[in-house]
Each structure stands twice: as structure tokens, then as C-alpha cells.
Amino acid sequence: MREKMNSQDLHIKAISIADEAFIKKFSGQLDEAKLLFKEALHYEKEAALSAQRDKIGEPSISILLKSAASLAINCDEFREAEKLISIALYGDDLSAERGSR
């Protein structure tokens, strides 16, 4: 059985994928970059959810949400970015957003 990743592991995975996405973006491979940004967004959003669930606290949760919002912008998911920023500002529970993907 696969072990569940914690927020730090999820964040590290998101950053690694985002690094690859930026390389693709800057080399003109925009479609591939967008897909990677979307994958990184998934992991960063999961990292924020995990941080909330584990009650890691602020500002860590808001920083993860801001990072996820930035990734959302990079894959043209502007409404998702707006939601993530709002959650970070409001301090709302991200788990309510989980089902709306």
C-alpha cells in the first residue's frame, strides 16, 4: 500500500514539477508547460489541504495557497486562482473546495 504524502512532500513534488514547467515555458513548449503547471497545481493544492488537515497553521497554509494560485495563473485557470486567493485571505477551509474540481 502506498504511503500518504504529507504537506511538505506534496509541496516539494509540486515545486519540482513547476520547475520543469518553467523550463518548458521558457523554451517555447507552451502546451507541455501548461500541462505540467496543472499537475503542479494539483499537488500544491493537496499540500495546502494536507496542511489544513494537520493543523500546521499560518502563515504556512496561506503561503501554500498563494503558491497554488500562482500555479493556477500559469495554467490559465484564473477562476481557480481567485478561489485560492480568497480562501487564503478569508482563512476558510479548503476541503469544501475539494469536490468542486
Image (cartoon, rainbow, N blue to C red):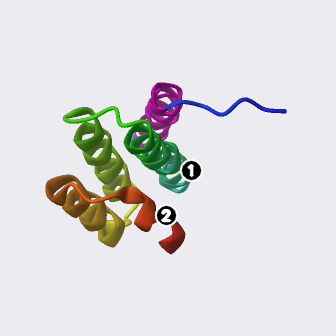
Main secondary structure type of the part rendered in magenta: helix
Residue at far left of view: 89
Badge 2, how many Cα within 10 Å: few under 14, some, many 20+?
Answer: few
Q: CA distance from mark 1 to mark 2?
A: 25 Å
Residue 32: mark in rendering: 1
Q: What residue would you read off at disc 2?
A: 98
Q: Give the camera-side residue of 54 and 31.
A: 54
22 drawn magenta: yes
- Residue 12 position in % (x across, y down): 48, 26
Check disc 1 and give the amino acid type: Glu
Residue at far right of view: 1
Q: Give the camera-side residue of 86 and 16.
A: 86
Identify the residue at image location x=40%, y=38%: 51
Check disc 2 and give the amino acid type: Arg
10 drawn magenta: yes
* Magenta stretch in the rendered image: 7-25
Identify the residue at image location x=26%, y=33%: 60
Identify the residue at image location x=52%, y=35%: 17
- Residue 93 position in % (x across, y down): 33, 58
Question: In the image, 61: left or right of 39?
Answer: left
| Above or below 77: residue 62 | above
